[in-house]
Image: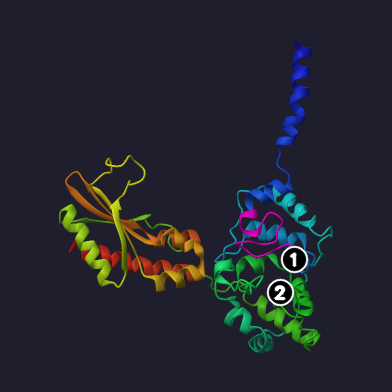
Amino acid sequence: MNNLLRIVLLLLTPIMVNAAPNGQQLFEKNCSTCHGTSGKGGVGIPISLPSFINSVSDNYLRKTIRYGRPGRVMPSFNNLSDNDVLLIVQYMRTWTGQKGKTFSKKRVKGSPRAGEKLFNQYCVSCHNSGGTGGVGTGVTFSRPRDAAIIAPSLNNPGFLSSAEDLFIKETLMNGRPGTPMMSYKAHGLSDKDINDLVSYIRNFEGGPYPYKEYDTESPVIKVESPYGLKETVQNVKDAIIGKNFKLIRTQELNKGLVDPGKENKNQIILYFCNFNFLNKALAIDPRVGMFLPCRVTIVKQDDKVYIMATNPLKLAAIFNNHELSEACKEMHRIYSELLEEASL
């Protein structure tokens, strides 16, 4: 029996060893949805550009995976172990076959005040005032299709926690071929100028930045209507039209999920949209499509009628992005006013 057990364990050993995910598998599971299977980009930015991947340290990549970019699309991967993160970084290095740069933690000494003047002269057109980054979140819908990236947010706590001063300095000096980022050394800036710029960028650390504000929000906005189902549905339609939204269709909530004729007549969903608002919101980030086109549900239950809608403020907590939060707040205001008008 002992010999049989040894044979079984020996046969299972390769299976158990192979079951552990490697770096490529971890990357494909956690990163490829945005960055593509080989880092060439897709919905998100390309990260296998040699001018990027060969210029950053392993430490920068590890911290970026761990901290993400609060307020942008890049989440923090707290679910991954340190070894998982290491394996992902090792896999990313296979794209060019080169080792990453190594930067000391030495701080660059310069004048933030002088750096601010240089930043406003040379950098603000792309990185925006205060280093908030290009408009949009970086995904394909929110940047020109022929642009590999939009200018990143330099006041981002995830970036500032990951980037060494000397890495920022080298990027300013050499630029990033394949992207709009130019070499400021070639552009005529002195070593002192670049030190001043680095000091100004580092000065963003600890400053204000929008984080999650709506974690405690309910996922659903819900009000009770004093009217019957039919009258409530008509009230919601009138309120939608009154807000200059286009009513797209009215149907039973479970239509298409049950056999024809078996739909629940006490559960109605109204689809409506303002296409100007929709286009502006999608230009920020297509994730806004989670609550667009707009939908309101009217349900009769136990002789009571309720009007319900997804709470966009709850989605704002998920997005964790200032621009998206503004769109979510606007949609929340619209939903709240519609539900209030329909139930007066």
Kind of residue sitting beneath label 2: Thr
What main secondary structure does the magenta stretch of the protein show?
loop
44 vs 320, nearest the viewer: 44
Disc marking residue 196:
none
Residue 10: give x, y in percent of width and height: 78, 23
Q: Quadrant of residue 124?
A: bottom right
Mark 1 highlights which residue? 49
Tell me the residue at 74%/51% (across/down): 86
- Residue 320, can we see it? no
- Residue 91, can we see it? yes
Q: Earlier in the sequence, mark 1 or mark 2?
A: 1
Q: Which residues are magenta?
A: 31-49
Magenta stretch: includes residue 106: no
39 vs 259, nearest the viewer: 259
- How far apart are the two marked residues, 1 and 2, measured between alpha carbons? 9 Å
- Residue that protrudes farthest toward the right in the picture: 98
Disc marking residue 179:
2
Sort mark 2 into few (<14), some (14-19) or many (20+) by Cα contacts within 10 Å: some
Residue 343: give x, y in percent of width and height: 20, 61
Residue 202: give x, y in percent of width and height: 67, 75
For the C terminus, give its image quadrant: bottom left
